[in-house]
């Protein structure tokens, strides 16, 4: 994979989630790695982020904490806060939903918590009559930490994906484990 990015949702009592993913030559998005730990401390996951950064040549980590971004930058990692302008979350949710509908997002079986979150969401009732979508109008009190990390990771991949279609890389596949 090329154009690899990481998404991190920082938790305190909630889980801290790290995801790494990239784009293949056909523009498919592949989520390859997951770290998911409640009450994780920076030292618990920072070394892993550094190892994944090297292994996957992560172009950038999108992290939902200004302080954590500064700490990661101090450690030599490229990190930024995610783009959170008005409607940014809805835009990336729509993009993710579209890519899932086209079978263009592939999640490694190792990413058990991301899969669990996506498969077990319950949506609030939509009074407009529209069918709810994955990652949209999530009912209160559900785990959405891995889904948030997915949003942070996918947003920069959405622009890199167009470049991936120009080719030159091998195909990606997950083997059954």
Image (cartoon, helix red, strand yellow):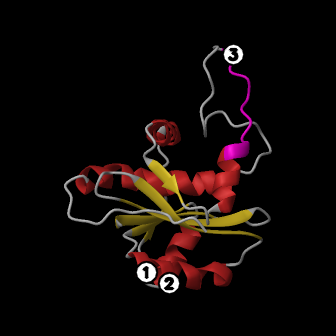
Q: Earlier in the sequence, mark 3 or mark 1?
A: 1
CA gap between label 3 and label 2 equals 46 Å
> Residues at badges 2 and 1 in contact (C-beta under 8 Å)?
yes
Which image quarter: residue 146? bottom right
* Residue at the spot of label 1: 55
Viewer-proximal residue among 99 and 82: 99
Mark carried by residue 75:
none
For the C terminus, give its image quadrant: bottom right
CA gap between label 2 and label 1 equals 6 Å
Viewer-proximal residue among 59 and 100: 100
Query: Is residue 124 in the magenta section?
Result: yes
Seen in the image, is 25 located left or right of residue 135?
A: left
Q: Earlier in the sequence, mark 3 or mark 2?
A: 2
Query: Is residue 87 in the magenta section?
Result: no
Query: Residue 95: percent from the left, percent from the top?
Result: 44, 39
CA gap between label 3 and label 1 equals 46 Å
Q: Look at the picture and state if 42 lies above or below 16.
A: below
> Residues at badges 3 and 2 in contact (C-beta under 8 Å)?
no
* Residue at the spot of label 2: 51
Q: Magenta part of the protein: which range?
A: 119-127
Residue 77 in view here: no
Viewer-proximal residue among 166 and 174: 174
Give the structural element (helix, strand or loop) at label 1: helix
* Residue at the spot of label 3: 127
């Amino acid at each position: 994979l090329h154009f690899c990015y990481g998404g991190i949702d920082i938790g305190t009592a909630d889980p801290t989630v790290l995801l790494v993913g990239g784009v293949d030559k056909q523009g498919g998005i592949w989520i390859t790695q997951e770290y998911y730990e409640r009450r994780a401390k920076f030292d618990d996951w920072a070394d892993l982020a550094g190892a994944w950064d090297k292994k996957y040549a992560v172009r950038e980590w999108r992290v939902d904490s200004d302080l954590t971004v500064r700490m990661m930058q101090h450690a030599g990692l490229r990190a930024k806060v995610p783009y959170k302008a008005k409607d940014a979350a809805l835009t990336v949710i729509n993009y993710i939903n579209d890519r899932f509908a086209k079978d263009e997002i592939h999640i490694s079986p190792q990413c058990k918590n991301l899969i669990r979150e996506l498969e077990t969401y319950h949506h609030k009732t939509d009074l407009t009559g529209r069918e709810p979508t994955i990652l949209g109008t999530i009912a209160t009190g559900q785990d959405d930490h891995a889904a948030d990390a997915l949003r942070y990771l996918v947003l920069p991949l959405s622009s890199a994906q167009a470049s991936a279609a120009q080719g030159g890389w091998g195909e990606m596949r997950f083997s059954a484990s």
